[in-house]
Image: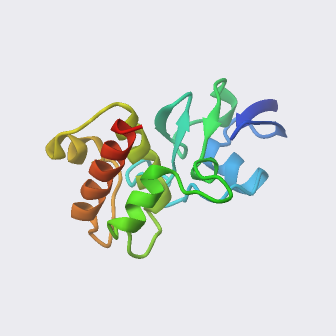
């Protein structure tokens, strides 16, 4: 089936099978590799992207059902400046192997945009994103740093 997706501000026309997930459309048809295929079951969060500003698991979302704009981690930074959440992840050493990082960052951006402040609420909000390296304390610190930077803007 022919579909049209707005990805990172650009309209993409694709011909895909009806059962193709948004993750596979991004990775295999558009070579957008920020979202990772971790579990392919919606359990790890490595594939998190934003659909109309909301974090979604792209491995569980059929590409043909997406009508809103899709944002991946690739669209967060500019050529010369990281997004405040990306910078906070670097500053707080909130990553180790990096496999989960793009999904963690996309969820963290949503947490900051929603104004989540309490560390327990941040942990709950981020609980769908697994980190096998256990960088969780630093991820919570990174969300707090980005939230404070966002509040001062």
Most distant residue in the front direction: 152
Q: Is residue 102 above or below residue 11?
A: below
Q: Dividing the image into 4 quarters, which one contains the N terminus? A: top right
Q: Is residue 54 something that shows in the picture? A: yes
Determine whether 148 is above or below 69 in the image.
Answer: below
Q: Position of residue 123 (x, y in %)?
A: 22, 48
The answer to whether 11 appears left or right of 150 in the picture is right
Q: Nearer the viewer, residue 84 or 39?
A: 84
**Which residue is painted at 45% across and 59% down in the image?**
87
State the residue in front, 13 or 102.
Answer: 102
Q: Is residue 105 left or right of residue 36?
A: left
Describe residue 64's horizontal placement relative to residue 38 as left or right: right
Say which residue appears at 39% left-offset and 55% top-offset.
Answer: 44
Identify the residue at image location x=63%, y=47%.
Answer: 75
Point out residue 121 in the picture as x, y percentages from the top left corner.
19, 40
User: In the image shown, does 123 or 26 lie closer to the viewer?
Assistant: 123
Residue 150 pos. (x, y %): 39, 40
Nearer to us in this view, 153 or 104: 153
Where residue 98 appears, as percent x and y from the top left, is: 46, 70
């Amino acid at each position: 089936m022919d579909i049209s997706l707005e990805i990172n501000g650009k309209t993409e026309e694709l011909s895909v099978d009806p059962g193709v997930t948004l993750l596979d459309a991004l990775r295999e048809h558009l070579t957008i590799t920020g979202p990772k295929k971790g579990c392919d079951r919606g359990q790890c969060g490595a594939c998190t992207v934003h659909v109309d500003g909301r974090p979604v698991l792209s491995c569980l979302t059929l590409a043909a059902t997406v009508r809103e704009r899709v944002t991946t981690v690739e669209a967060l930074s500019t050529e010369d400046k990281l997004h405040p959440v990306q910078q906070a992840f670097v500053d707080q050493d909130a990553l180790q192997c990096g496999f989960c990082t793009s999904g963690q960052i996309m969820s963290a951006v949503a947490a900051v945009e929603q104004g989540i402040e309490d560390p327990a609420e941040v942990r709950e909000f981020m609980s769908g994103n697994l980190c096998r390296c256990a960088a969780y304390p630093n991820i919570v610190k990174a969300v707090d740093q980005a939230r404070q930077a966002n509040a001062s803007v």
